[in-house]
Amino acid sequence: MSEKSSEGNLDLGLQNIQDDLLVLKKTDLELAFLALLTCKGLKPLSRWEKPLADNELVSLQQISLLTKKITRTVKTGKEVIETVFSLSPVYIKLYEQQFGDTPIDKSAETQRFEGFLFGYPPCCIEQYIRKPYAANNLEEKDQKILFHWACKNCKVTPLLLDSYRSFYNVLSNLE
Ligand SMILES: [Zn+2]
């Protein structure tokens, strides 16, 4: 690793969590990115729509995240296992109470509550409910690192993007 990127990591306070982020990145860069955004408080709670292996759960826990396996069902009745993680037991409990052992649904009510838990700007959630993927004025490379679809002329997303970009860049270069 170059000296410059180590300094970058130190600036973002990542030196103690690099090894765990690497474990997660080996599974999926997106999983590691969600974990990083959540452990830095940019997302109250995140959901991985699959079960995780023990070593992946341990890595999440070692970077201060609480984890919970949630059982859902799809239309066919088949069970689906999700993994949620958060710094806060309250958010884990809210997710479990609302969605544990329930069918996966995409109602407006669900999207609003999920958006709240996942740290999405309310303006973007409402726009997405009215019309998903409506044109916005973000650059494609910025939209790509977000987990919500930004509304047009969003006043909140640009405030989040600097942090998202910094964390994403550090994580991409981590090896
Ligand atoms: Zn917005």
Image (cartoon, helix red, strand yellow):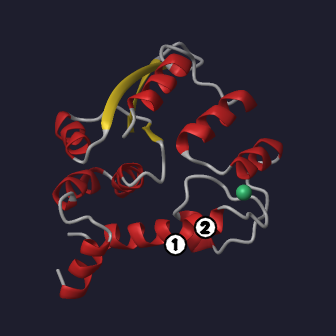
The picture quadrant for ligand 1 comes to bottom right
Query: Is 19 above or below relative to 65?
Result: below
Of 99 and 27, nearer the camera is 99
Q: Left or right: 97 with respect to 134? A: left
Of 42 and 83, nearer the camera is 42
Of 30 and 122, nearer the camera is 122
Q: Quadrant of residue 155?
A: bottom right
For label 1, the crowd category at 10 Å Cα-Cα, with few meaning under 14, some 14 to 19 and many 20 or more, is few
Q: Which residue is mark 1?
A: 162
Query: Is 124 above or below relative to 114?
Result: below
Element under disc 2 = helix
Across and down, in percent, residue 94 comes to 51, 24
Query: Is 134 above or below relative to 109?
Result: below
What's the amino acid at mark 1?
Asp
For label 2, the crowd category at 10 Å Cα-Cα, with few meaning under 14, some 14 to 19 and many 20 or more, is few
**Going 53% across and 21% down the picture, which residue do you hit?**
99
**Going 46% across and 40% down the picture, which residue do you hit?**
45
What's the amino acid at mark 2?
Leu
The answer to whether marks 2 and 1 mark residues whose Cβ atoms lie closer than 8 Å is yes
Q: Quadrant of residue 86?
A: top left
Q: CA distance from mark 2 to mark 1?
A: 7 Å
Element under disc 1 = helix
**Going 20% across and 69% down the picture, which residue do you hit?**
175
**Going 56% across and 20% down the picture, which residue do you hit?**
98
Residue 23 numbered tag: none
Q: Which residue is mark 2?
A: 159
Q: Is mark 1 within 8 Å of ligand 1?
A: no
Across and down, in percent, residue 49 comes to 44, 35
Across and down, in percent, residue 2 comes to 19, 85
Of 38 and 80, nearer the camera is 38
